[in-house]
Image (cartoon, rainbow, N blue to C red):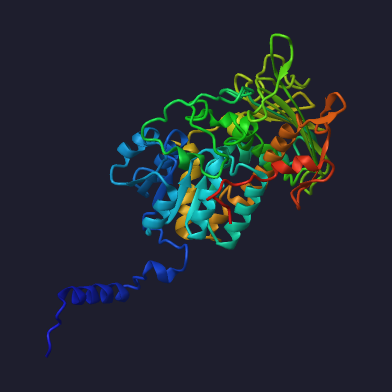
Amino acid sequence: MKKNSNPNSRRSFIKKSSLTALGISIIPRHVMGRGFIPPSDKLNIAIVGAGGKGYSDAVNVYNKGASNIAAICDVDWNSANRAFSFFPNAKKFKDYRILLDEVKDIDAITVSTPDHTHAVITLSAMQLNKHVYVQKPLTHNIYEARVLTEAANKYQIVTQMGNQGASGQGVQTMINWFNSGMIGTVNQVEVWTNRPVWPQGIMTPTDKPTILEGLDWDTWIGPAEWVDYNPLYHPFKWRGWWNFGTGALGDMGCHLMDPPYRVLGLGYPTEVESSVGSIFTQDWTPDYYPESCPPSSRTQLKFSATEKNRSEVKLNWTDGGLRPFHPELIPADHPIGDENSTNGVIMIGDKGIMTCGTYGLNPKIYLNTGEIIKVDFEDDDNTNILPENGHQAKWVDACKEGYGSEKHKQLTSSFDFAGPLTEFILMGNLAIRSYNLREKNGNSFEYPGRKKLLWDGSNMKITNFEPANQFVKRTYREGWKLD
């Protein structure tokens, strides 16, 4: 008899035969179908954007070794140094395009970069069948949000946006309260934040300091209009510039607007109106710098009645440290929203008022009868095991089961929800940016954008002021595109 020249193949055959006898079979990953990873396997994850929030996202998807961090990409290796130290075996990159081209065995990526690069990175990954977790806001503009929402379905990708409060007990409690009819029909919502906590409403810098060592500025700029490096842009302060960020509304809207949008089952807004604050010069002339987000703003969006809430809703957003006044039902010595009232949500119904803070924390009801209802959550929801309500870990578990699985359907901020949510939030920015558009009329200027703007959500279009539509999407820098 001819001996088997490969003893390993014989051992493999015996092992497989034994498992088969026990009713167990070994099936290669690729046979299970695209996007399916056996639950026993670790997800291979690439981190794109590893400083600040990117670092905590990396730690949370790693989840004490439940996943493997295969690669880390950041244009600024100074910001990424902490992540490099925590994950010493991860491959290092500065350009996500090189990462996606060279690291073939990654299953998923996290995107925690500045807002202006979310869409191009995310779409590139989805086109390679990589699952994606993207920090809020999902995109820099409305058009990009629509593109990513459609792409997630087209490529059958498991997605999640990083508004972690969506996975918390507070938001679900509010949904249950509203569905049971406790506050009745809602017609007004107030949402506010103390942001910005970075410079806004300022002059565009003109000096040209030396670029930080270890920073790839060209890749950091990505699809945005080119500007020279300045510490007023990076790190962190990019949020206050329209070229890169989405201001206070983009930063906190996905955390604070999520509860009313989800609880009331809202759709696309039908109209929007904004007013913005100014910084004044010594002669009391308002300074307006169109490249910089305003120091404060107030925006009202109107929504049609829905099956869940049979009334039109006016949602008022306020930033810059201003907040709405106490409703009569809330005692004067009670904070509204967060414990210090700096951020929050008020939903006013015909039977009472529902409130919460950032991430849906501290939900309360003040009924017309004078009764106050609140919940003291027990620490039994695995928050110590799964950080940030397990928002990232739940995405990892859904990636293992694949697109359309039960765990995928249970995700609270997949792009089918996060995309429309982001669109309506960024529509507020469209109105904010339109507010100071000027037209010459004789010897003076008119401000035609200072009016109520009517919105066709399906077609992503302002119907009564064409100049505002320039803010629906952006022009991409040469060499960059979204397709």
Q: Is residue 382 visible?
A: no
Quadrant of the snapshot with the C terminus: bottom right
Q: Quadrant of residue 287?
A: top right
Q: Residue furthest bottom?
A: 1
Quadrant of the snapshot with the N terminus: bottom left
Q: Tell me residue 296's x, y (percent).
A: 68, 23
Q: How many marks?
A: 0
Q: Tell me residue 202's x, y (percent).
A: 62, 22
Q: Is residue 112 above or below residue 284?
A: below
Q: Is residue 329 left or right of residue 395?
A: right
Q: What residue do we see at 74% from left, 11% from top? A: 284
Q: Which is nearer the eye, 410 or 20? A: 410
Q: Residue furthest right?
A: 442
Q: Tell me residue 367's x, y (percent).
A: 76, 28
Q: Is residue 179 left or right of residue 108?
A: right
Q: What residue do we see at 23% from left, 73% from top? A: 12
Q: Tell me residue 155's x, y (percent).
A: 55, 62
Q: Quadrant of residue 251?
A: top right
Q: Is residue 326 above or below residue 47?
A: above
Q: Which is nearer the eye, 449 or 105? A: 449
Q: Residue furthest top?
A: 282
Q: Residue furthest front?
A: 443
Q: Is residue 42 left or right of residue 120?
A: left
Q: What residue do we see at 49% from left, 60% from top? A: 129
Q: Is residue 33 above or below residue 332?
A: below
